Image: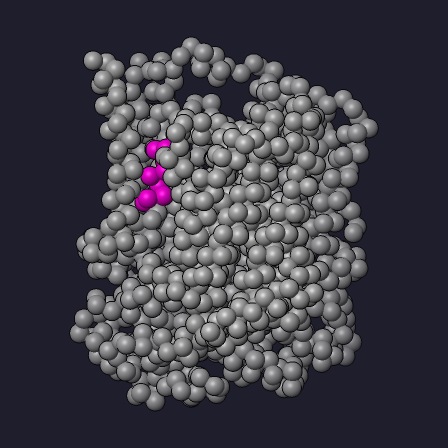
Amino acid sequence: MKKIWLPTLALFTSITLAACGGGEDSENSNAEGNSSGDGNWEPEQSLEFVAPSGAGGGWDTTARMAAEGFEEQDIMDQGIGVVNKEGGGGAVGWSYIAGKAENPHHLFVASPPLLLIPLNGQSEYGHEDFTPIANMISDYGAFAVREDAPWDDLNDLFEDMKDSPEDITVIGESSPGSMDHIQFVKIAKEAGVDPQSVKYVSAQDGSTMTNLLNGNADVYSTGVTETVEQVRAGEIKVLGVTAEERLEGDVVEDFPTATEQGIDETFVNWRGFFGPPGMTDEQITYYEEKFKELNDSEFWDETRDKYAWNELYMDSEEYAEFLEDEKESMQELLDEVNVEEE
Amino acid sequence: MGSIEGILSGVQLAFSIEGILFVFLGVLAGTLIGMMPGLGPISAIAIMIPLTYNMDPTVALVLMAGVYYGAVFGGSTSSILLNAPGISGTVATSFDGYPMAQRGEAGKALAVAAIASFFGGTVSVILLMLFAPVLSSVAIVFGPPEYFALMVLGLTAISSLSDGSTVKALISAVLGIMAVTIGIDSQTGTTRFTFNNPNLLEGIDFLVVALGLFALAEVCALIINRNQTSKDRKSLGSLKLSKNDMKDMSGPMGRQSILGFILGVLPGAGATIASFIGYITEKKLAKKPEEFGKGAVRGVAAPETANNAATSGAFVPLLSLGIPGSGTTAVLLGALLVLDIQPGPLLMSEQPQLFWGVIVSMYVGNLFLLILNLPLIPYIAKILAIPRPLLISLVIMFSMIGVYSISFNTFDLYLLVIFGVIGYLMRLFKFPPAPFILAFILGGMMEESFRQAMTMSNNDLSIFINKPIALGMLIAAFLSFTVPIWQGYRSNKKNSA
Amino acid sequence: MLKPVHRKISLLLIALAIFYLYLAYQLPSFSNSVINASTMPKILGFGLIALSLFLFFTPEQETKEEKEKRHIPKADLIKIAGVVLMILAYIFFLERLGFILVSFLFIYFCSYFLGYTKHSINFLVSILFPAILYSAFTMLLGISLPSGIIPF
């Protein structure tokens, strides 16, 4: 069904929220609160990390692990509850946070869809409507083909694509113009393939890998981790990943990067935390410090290993700049991909 | 040989105290959550995720699987008693289950559903054990052309879901597909028919349509008959099945447990399609098809066997390939990743205890479900003895909360009321609601797979002919649609001659 | 000519189809998509028109009895309208007043409105049901329903 639903509000959130007086009063008495005096701000109620997706996905895992880390490492005094706000590829969660303007106790996890979905006109809120706090990790895209496919590296594939793009079907989870599509187009374009000629099919019902294996699709554009099990089983091979350098880890260290194949382009699936609009400098500084501490902790190191994430910390200012650049390059790509007729 | 050792270690796990305890907790939670209006297996699994974070992965998977098929098992209750299907897999159950309950045979209908569910669940687990390793290659033969053909075949059920005018049934179906075109189009990313309303971007949720067209529309009818005396309490809760009933059930249960399992194995097809196809094949095979839709025991047994069998089937691609076949198994896969289990083609050989442990636990779980559910039926069925005015208010509130707990958005509740009104008007003017909901469920997938296939083939229709499975299903669809019409035409001619 | 009710319905459906088609023709088409977003809606729109025309020209088959069935006594219509209004009020106040309070008011007054006169039972049920449901959802299932003005 469309709205796969999962509002898993962790039990203790509701209790903690309730303990705080459960409602509007305490939520609105926020911002100025402790910011008086020496310019130090501290949260005065329990925090809420919003994953704008269902339980179990990348955003959700990041939010939950961060919450667990803050608690385990005693970095923050306040309790943290993780809340799932699913829908619209994130749009539902974003509009929820936008409605929490000036209440810095609600943060959310985001990644490139925060840029792409608004650019595709599917959300009225974009990254500029929120306060970037810190980027925590990065992930990369992978392009996989069947083990018996005629291509052995990305250049083989792109050469064939230049000649007859209509013969090669690229499949991905997200809709056209969103992440799986754009990461492929970005690399292919650098290799000289016309972005518009890429034949991309979106399969949002979990049938992407099936369609690669049964030959309905030729190339699968996805995240690195999604490919690992099938590579180990010898069913598929990964022609290239979008990282700058080789990844570390058991299977993934064998995946060649696009860069080392002479295609000078990367795609970062960054993931970090954002706050509602209108946060003060003191509030940003507070969170930056806390997230930096988490990032440097052993706990986070283990977490990165466990989920095969890579380290990519950015503070609020760097993050904002990075996002501007990213958005610009996405916009360019989208303009080339989505050509309206007439 | 290796697999026999694997099975034994699985048996050991499933029958350990921990294994039995968690499968019990899983099916108990699942069946209770499944009975709640609006909460289906997806919600049930999602609810359990945070609880399993620190559990042993195998035990957690046993628990999650229990929650999953437990929720499917319990899902039929609100369909039968209140005409309020909480998940798409139990819509077909309401076609005959609700009329049975209205006739005062609620207990019997629930018992039929429970037995059929148990049978479907158990037989499919046996099939799962025997064929899981072999079936993994079958699970991936279906691509967009095959899915398109399957959806078309499913849609031919429209002609057999109407008991009056075929034109009205078709109109109802077209309206159903129209409703599902609202929202972001998956293949281009453009928004369609949303009137710039962000609440419509995701499309209309299944539950809004199902509870509106069925439950709320039924409420209107109940309001008119609100003073009818309540049912005879004794027969309401009676579980007694006559020999004849058992005979009636055996055919559908035998066939649908196999067919349902096969459809469940196919990623993307799942319990809903299995239940609809189960319902129509049994209607076609029945000696008295006219009894279907009016409270036939077969009409309850068929979809309930099929949807539970399909649920076990869905574990084939998940456990043997690491591919989620449905929205529910995708959530389950997400939950496994959190637990550090990465299902893939090597799971069976690398972690045989986990693989077989889960499967063996499913026998135990299905048995628990039957033992749990049967004694409860007399009490659950008594819900219908509640005085009408009070029952009406409660059904309305339940439907509202079911919808609200999906989206936490009151917009969906207003939509629910609109669909309730549409549903009532459809009844008044004799437009059957079943084709609407069937088209709503299948139409979206049909359009998507058609467009995927056409993109893959570069706009060449022969992709549907070159694939034997797709072609076979399309021919079957054509025949199942035209033969009844032709027969009707011929018998008409004879009569007038 | 419009006397049989199915003709009126068919005209109404045609109007709906035309509106739907109008919107479908506004949809953008992209050069890189093989089957456009508007293709299926166009087929549906024209299909609905064709089916409605077919319906228009089918001879009336309704028996008198069936027609009678459609006639709803005025008193019942008032009841239905009343319940719909109460539902709308329920939705409107759900997030403002909270689940328990609104559900209590709804169940009590809706049952009363439909002719339930055992006030004490009604009162008990309408307070217990929402309360139990609320605690089950929030405590056991971790789904938070609007708490509203009741502070827990």
Residue B235 seen in the current view: yes
Residue A3 vs B422, above or below: the answer is below
Looking at the image, which residue is at 27% across and 52% down? Answer: B470
x, y (%) of residue B358?
56, 64
Residue B22 belongs to magenta span? no
Seen from the viewer's position, the closer of residues A141 and B210 is B210
The range drawn in magenta is B152-162
x, y (%) of residue B296?
49, 30
Magenta stretch, main secondary structure class: helix
Relative side of C132 to B163, left or right: right
Residue A206 vs C61, above or below: the answer is below
Residue B159 belongs to magenta span? yes
Seen from the viewer's position, the closer of residues C131 and A45 is C131
Residue A63 seen in the current view: no
x, y (%) of residue B218?
55, 29
Looking at the image, which residue is at 50% across and 56% down? Answer: B125
Residue B216 vs A91, above or below: the answer is above
